[in-house]
Image: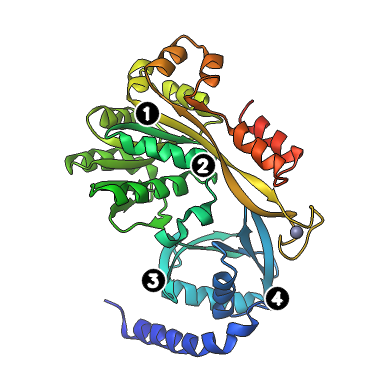
Amino acid sequence: MKSKLEKLAIEQLFTNSTVDFFKKTEDTNSSRLSSFEDIMMYLLNNNISDLHFSSKKSCVTIYYRYNTELIKLSELEKDEYKKILTKIQIMSKIDIINNRDPADGSFTFLNNYFRVSLINNNYGTNCVIRKLKTINDLTIENLKYPEEFLKSIESIKLHKDGLIIFSGPTGSGKTTSLAFIILQLLKEKTKKIITIENPLEYIIPGAEQIEIKNDSQKTSILKNILRHDPDIIMTGEIRTDEFAKLTLESAMTGHYVFSTIHANNVFNAIQRLELLGLNKSYLLDTLKIIYNQRFVKILCSCNKKGCETCKYTGYSDIIPVFEILHINEYTKQMILSNKIDEIKNSIFYISPEIQLNRLLIQGKIDTEEYNQFITSIGG
Ligand SMILES: [Zn+2]
């Protein structure tokens, strides 16, 4: 139960904010953002996914995520930030009195759902606000998926069980790809889909999404999920031997399992899973497709000189580039006998270079970005 005082505070917040929205909508692009409403409107109007409030010695700096970079938005006086933070804490139902550290919560603002995470540093509290995405964000136009990836989803639809692995570094769009695939699978047939997420990034109607805070809960949660007889399970990242083993077992016993792992490329992903104690032969019998994905930066029309459009970063967008390996009897035998070149020359392997060459010819990336990509996948 909420206390009377808290209720009153929340009511007051919302009455004030409603008035503010309409008054302030027009000047949200100004560099002086000093109220909660100004900042939130700026975030929504500029399609920003996350805001970072960083407490410094004498002020608080607001950053936002643009493509992969953090860009400084503005600065707040300590007093201004204190008011904003209190508002965020109340709206997110975060205990203000006890000031637990770290703390997290969520709130809605103009029908958008936001997650809040607070952590203290020497100079005060840092706050990250992240907008949860919805299925409306998951369009091919938004995500700019290449034809190679879209075509591979048709192969995914052909299978009913087994293991699909997405590999790549943190922030390479693996979760987004999985959310996109769930949507495609939900369009096909009514299936029971259960996901384990840490943290939740997309709200997908039709899927049962379980958000966990601690990765150590994962194995027991997956065991529980299996008792609910799902058709499709998204397990999130594989980090431990125990979880790798249970993930493979689930995929071997009639479930269609989707997982992610940190790896530089598709072959490295297999090695990583093997290092986590999985039997290579069982693994290859169960695997259907392995992906590796990461973003490339698309050149802005200002030709890296920096302009308002690209927020002076030189790049106007990021798009995902995929390496795709289909596992079947042929590729299994080639992997077991370590004939990687044979696989790379086969139709079962889709090199990221196909996509990179296309982008280079179109002038969307430069050779620097191209080479950086090749180095990052260990090519
Ligand atoms: Zn530019």
- The answer to whether mark 3 is within 8 Å of ligand 1 is no
Q: Residue at x 69, y 78 (%)?
A: 30
Distance from label 1 to label 2 (Cα)?
Answer: 19 Å
Distance from label 2 to label 3 (Cα)?
Answer: 44 Å
Q: Which amino acid, by three-letter code, is at mark 3?
A: Lys
Distance from label 2 to label 4 (Cα)?
Answer: 40 Å
User: With respect to residue 263, does 27 lie above or below?
Assistant: below
Label 4 sits on a secondary structure element that is loop
Q: Earlier in the sequence, mark 1 or mark 3?
A: 3
Dot 1, crowdedness within 10 Å: few (<14), some or many (≥20)?
many
- Name the side, left or right, on which 362 lies relative to 179: right
Distance from label 1 to label 3 (Cα)?
Answer: 43 Å
- Residue beneath label 4, please? 31
Looking at the image, do the residues carrying marks 1 and 3 touch, with CB atoms under 8 Å apart?
no
- Residue beneath label 2, please? 147
Q: Which amino acid, by three-letter code, is at mark 2?
A: Glu
- Residue beneath label 1, please? 288
Label 3 sits on a secondary structure element that is loop
Looking at the image, do the residues carrying marks 4 and 1 touch, with CB atoms under 8 Å apart?
no
Q: Quadrant of the N terminus?
A: bottom left
Look at the image and tell me whether residue 122 can be seen: no
Of residues 325 and 14, the one drawn nearer to the viewer in this rendering:
325
- Residue beneath label 3, please? 93
Q: Residue at x 41, y 15 (%)?
A: 330
- Tell me how many marks there are: 4
Q: Position of residue 54 (x, y in %)?
A: 62, 63
| Between marks 1 and 2 in the image, the one whose residue lies nearer the viewer | 2
